[in-house]
Amino acid sequence: MQEIKQYFYKIINYNMFKKIGHTIALIDSGIGGISILKQLIKNGGNYIYFADNDFMPYGKRSKSKLKKRLNGIISLLENKFNVDKIIIACNTASTLIENTNTIMTMRFITDKVYLATSLSKKNLKNYEVIADSTLATQIEKHIFDKSLLDKIIKKHILKYQLNNLEEFVLGCTHYELVYDIFCKYCPKTKIYRNSEFILNDIIMESTTDINIKFITSRQSKSYIDLMMKLVKGE
């Protein structure tokens, strides 16, 4: 397999990084997994976030190429960084990787309707999935343009008639970043965040320290700045 490029950006309490015990790594194609990271750091802790922005979006990749890519990143995190647990913070990727003692993947509930990527739909054949091929990329591109995102989400809700459903699941972590907009236009619909199912499985030890190391597969200072703003809630 071709070597995966890595670019490192370090912070502890948003300044630098050091090892202080158990480390949890998160993998996503871009910023979507930040929605999970923000929930985890409420308890403090030590994290590595791998944003595979050179391979984004995962939803448009072939199953074989993406699985090979993910196995390479997992191997890197296990062997070079000696992480204690890896969270596949991407629903599309979770349909390809097996859950183990050290690897945690998203869990899917069979009786729920999912709004997810096209590749997720192909891999979740026994689930009811409303597939979209562009929404995750649009959210990634316009994450800080709230006015435009509002219009984009509203358009997709009307397109798939999501506001007429009793309930559905946001089956992509990118979608969770704009959860409030989905709720705005689906006021009578119960909307689940798929990360809820995996977060319930994670046992955290509370600490006052927050230590995060960002790794990207394509170098971009502006991209790191974007992720840090999301983590800080700016």
Image (spheres, helix red, strand yellow):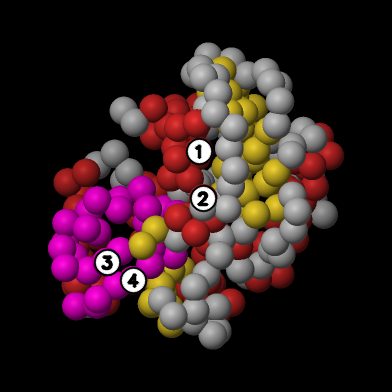
Q: Is residue 45 above or below residue 121?
A: above
Q: Is 5 drawn above or below residue 117 in the view shown?
A: above
Image height of 146 relative to 122, above or below: above
Q: Which residues are magenta?
A: 164-191
Name which residue lies at 53% across and 14% down.
Answer: 15
Can residue 151 be seen?
no
Q: CA distance from mark 2 to mark 4?
A: 18 Å
Q: Are marks 4 and 3 in contact (CB under 8 Å)?
A: no
Q: Where in the figure is residue 55, as x and y percent of width and height?
A: 59, 52
Q: Mark 3 belongs to which amino acid?
A: Lys
Q: Position of residue 197 (x, y in %)?
A: 49, 59
Distance Cα–Cα, label 3 vs label 1: 23 Å
The quarter of the picture where residue 230 lies is: top left
Badge 2 is on which residue? Answer: 199
**Upstream in sequence: badge 2 or badge 4:** 4
The alpha-carbon separation of the residues under discs 1 and 2 comes to 8 Å
| Residue 173 highlighted magenta (yes or no) | yes
Looking at the image, residue 183 sits to the left or right of residue 107; the answer is left
Q: Nearer the viewer, residue 79 or 156?
A: 79
